[in-house]
Image (cartoon, rainbow, N blue to C red):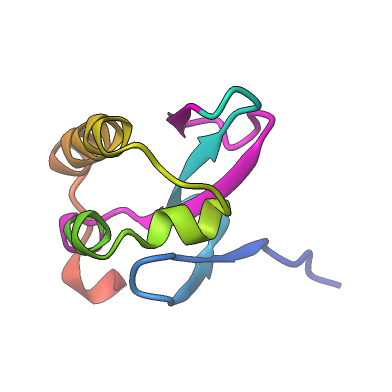
Amino acid sequence: MMKKKPQRMCVSCRQRRDKKDLMRVVLDSEGNISYDPSGKLPGRGSYLCKNEECIMIELKAHRLSKGLRHGVDEEQLRSVAKELLELCEKNPVDADDN
């Protein structure tokens, strides 16, 4: 019997993908948001696709705050988005993967 791969939904494009194909943003107990490369940090997590398009849509639509169930500070959001965009530039994803 094959082991199931965990699935998560991108808060931006709303597509389900394997957890490893998404980037996790976590809200810690102090109200700070950050990128979670390990996917194991404690706190409320939301996921974004590993492409620039989903991150840019998120910056305009503010869907991350709904996924985290908490208001997101604009400055923190821009900081995390910048970090995620840099990761996307380093590790581009094929358009066919989306």
- Residue drawn at 67 percent across, 61 percent down: 6
49 or 56: nearer the viewer: 56
Direction right: furthest residue? 1
Q: Is residue 11 above or below residue 51?
A: below
Q: Position of residue 79 (x, y in %)?
A: 24, 29
- Residue drawn at 22 percent across, 54 percent down: 59
3 or 12: nearer the viewer: 12
- Residue drawn at 58 percent across, 46 percent down: 45
Q: Is residue 80 left or right of residue 37?
A: left
Direction left: furthest residue? 89
Q: Is residue 20 above or below residue 96?
A: above
- Residue drawn at 41 percent across, 55 percent down: 64
Q: Position of residue 83 (x, y in %)?
A: 24, 31
Question: Where on the picture, by quarter, is residue 73?
Answer: top left
Direction top: furthest residue? 30
Q: Is residue 14 left or right of residue 92?
A: right
Q: Is residue 60 above or below residue 95?
A: above
State the extent of the magenta-drawn residues as a range: 32-54
* Numbered-mark total: 0
Q: Position of residue 66 (x, y in %)?
A: 49, 61
Q: Is residue 43 left or right of residue 55?
A: right
Question: Where on the picture, by quarter, is residue 33?
Answer: top left
7 or 55: nearer the viewer: 55
Q: Is residue 71 left or right of residue 12?
A: right
Report if residue 77 lies within the magenta region: no
The C terminus lies in which quarter of the figure? bottom left
The N terminus lies in which quarter of the figure? bottom right
Report if residue 44 lies within the magenta region: yes
